[in-house]
Image (tube, rainbow, N blue to C red):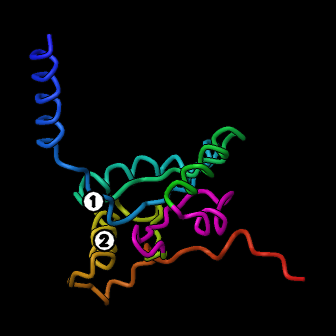
Amino acid sequence: MKLRSAAAVSALLALLIAVPAFAAPDVYVVNFRHAEDATSQKLDSQLASALEMARVNAEEVVIDTTTAAKWEKAAHDAFNRDIVPVFNKWVGLPGFAAVVDANSKTVIGCVNASVHPTEMAREIQQMVSVAKGDAYISKASSGTTATQCPDAYNKPLVD
């Protein structure tokens, strides 16, 4: 019996050692959405396609304010990823996604449904390059507004 237990423990340890650790994401793609917002619905499908095409180490975090329960879950998700200031800045403003450096927790840029998923994927790839400190080729003359974030929706009260 002891031999069987020792073998099972050894096999379990070997399995744990062989399984690679999952790397933390380079960026969080924070999707601010509301089910009744047409722009949110369009962005959901485009963002899913863009993230698949971009093939980057990104984690989508959905900030859904459709119901109180989804709003609360979103707040917990933001807290668990230490991006509460990003949550607080735009919660309640649907239809765009903020790309946040997972290490520094700073916003690199935003994407919205006004661009094709291919362009969105390229923008996300560039933002991940910024987060990783890699060089990338920029098309400065393209004049895209995909990375412009909206003004803060929730502003702190001033005494």
Q: Which mark is residue 128?
A: 2
Which one is nearer the viewer's eye here, 149 or 105? Answer: 105
Vertical position of residue 137 compared to residue 91: above or below: below
| 9 relative to 104 in the view: left or right | left
Quadrant location, the C terminus? bottom right
| Residue 43 in the image: above or below residue 127 | above
For numbered disc 2, what is the local secondary structure?
A: helix
Q: The N terminus is located in which quarter?
A: top left
Q: Quadrant of residue 158?
A: bottom right
Q: How far across and down, in percent of the image, does residue 67 sit?
A: 69, 39
Q: Which residue is more in the foreground, 11 or 152?
A: 11
Q: Residue at x 27, y 51 (%)?
A: 52
Label 2: how many Cα within 10 Å (few below 14, some 14–19, many 20+): many
Residue farthest to the bottom?
141
Q: Please provide percent x and percent y for residue 135.
A: 21, 84
Q: Is residue 89 magenta?
A: yes
Indicate the position of residue 92 as horizontal and vertical percent values.
68, 57
Q: Residue at coordinates 33% horizontally, 83% vertically from top-left?
A: 142
User: Residue 99 lies in magenta, yes or no?
Assistant: yes
Q: Are marks 2 and 1 in contact (CB under 8 Å)?
A: yes
**Which amino acid is tagged 2?**
Val
Looking at the image, which residue is at 39% across and 71% down? 103
- Magenta range: 82-105
Q: Is residue 129 left or right of residue 148?
A: left
Q: Which mark is residue 46?
A: none
- Please, what secondary structure does the residue beneath circle 1 have? loop
Classify 10 Å Cα crowding around label 1: few (below 14), some (14-19), many (20 and above): some
Mark 1: amino acid: Asn
Q: Compare residues 3 and 157 and report the one nearer the observer.
A: 3
Identify the residue shown where x is 66% and y is 48%: 65
Provide the residue designation for mark 1: 57
